[in-house]
Image (tube, helix red, strand yellow):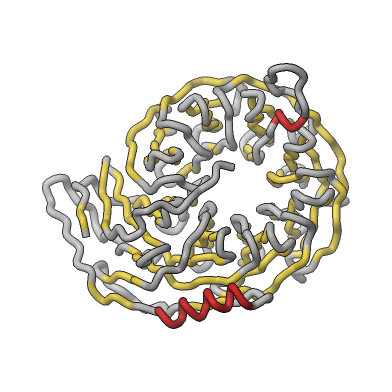
Amino acid sequence: MIATSVGNQLDRRYLFLASSITIATILISSSLLVAPRLEGPKTMTQTTTATLTSTETITSRITQTLTSCSTSSSATSTTSSRSSSTASSTFQSVPIRLASPQAPVFNPINGDIYVTNSGDGTISVISDRTNRFVAILCVGRSPFTPLFNPANGELYAPNAGGSTVSVISGERVVATIPVGDSPRTPAFDSQNGDIYVPDYGSDFVSVISGATDTVVANVTAGRGVGGVVFNPTNGNLYFTSNQQGAVLVVSGATNSVIANLTLDFAICNGPCTRFQDNPTPPVFDPANGDVYVSNAGGNTVSVISGATNSIISNGGVGDDPLTSAIDSSNGNIYVPNLKQNTVSVISGATNTVVASVAVGFAPLPPVFNPANGNIYVPINSVGTLSIISGATNTVISTVSIGSYPSYPPAFDSTNGDVYVSCGDGTVWVILASSAATPPLPM
């Protein structure tokens, strides 16, 4: 993972509209500000203004929360009031010391966006109805991006520094579950209702019951297990391990490893070690039932058949490929090549590369927007995001965002917006509707 860092421009207050895409900026660090959602389409000839009114501060509540986070051993939470707001209302608070934000997660039940701050053990919560900050949740040390469980509506946030998983219901932490060392973002098994937590620093996977929020099994899987995806067609989970250079297949029915697929595709100067395959978190293609694993050290993508649990293809892509995104409209797989500044497009029908799309410097894992058929690719460090049309496999827009974006972005299925968190302390909202207008300083 590319490290994120908090930049110096933490006091910016503006709504940015560019390149036929409307961008709202949410500052979640120094002088936190949530920009209002613009209602109705805008045209190039219109002059758009936004008046910052109805400012609400919760200085004492935020201060109390951060003090609680730093002194309490148990997870707590604090919530700001949810009030109806007009298009001109904003939210502002004292600094919350945002550090190392992780990829955002959307909760379709309450319409909230959850941004994990791994540097201070908190999760910032933003309402998608108002694009206002509504809560800070104290979790454990060094939390990673949480998993949303559609069966019970809870989120499971792994705390890598505390060997626990925080369970979040709405805007409150309701449980803390001990697991193995250095847990990573888990996967949900929709067939048995359990949550599978890769314990990167241990030699097992923790299985949490979604019904009781307790660990019901530990599956021995070996060291370095990190990324995971669930395959609903066969009930198996696929774990990548960069220490083993392998993909381990775990049966959700028996909670045991049923296949160990060695990769060995690294390109090395001299003898290779399994560390050098560096497989990234896998993705599942519901159209063909296959699992796709990018081998960053081998410049390839391995395709694993869900029917046989074997590698059926290992095709070359660009330099240093990362985790891909699946376009459910055209059946293609979009693979960002970090060191080649391109995105390789793989056909899910043939498992061959059908296009290479030039984007910005150092593209990161993207997200697919099923509302418009586009793929959103954050670009590392330069503060832009490339938008690829799934219909033409060409870049149709490049928009400015914050620097050092976390990845992948989150798609909000309620309003069609895309959320991107960045290391400079901002969250960028790419609004689904509105045409381009000039940037407006606030």
Image quarter of the C terminus: bottom left
Identify the residue at horizontal 44%, vertical 72% (top origin): 134
x then y, percent, for residue 333: 55, 32
x then y, percent, for residue 20: 27, 42
In this view, 217 is above or below 213: above
Judge whether residue 416 can be spotted in this image: no
Judge whether residue 269 can be spotted in this image: yes
x then y, percent, for residue 399: 33, 41
Q: Residue furthest top?
A: 270
x then y, percent, for residue 441: 21, 55
Image quarter of the N terminus: top right
Identify the residue at horizontal 27%, vertical 51% (top origin): 16
Identify the residue at horizontal 39%, vertical 72% (top origin): 94
Identify the residue at horizontal 78%, vertical 61% (top origin): 179
In this view, 166 is above or below 206: below
In this view, 378 is above or below 427: above
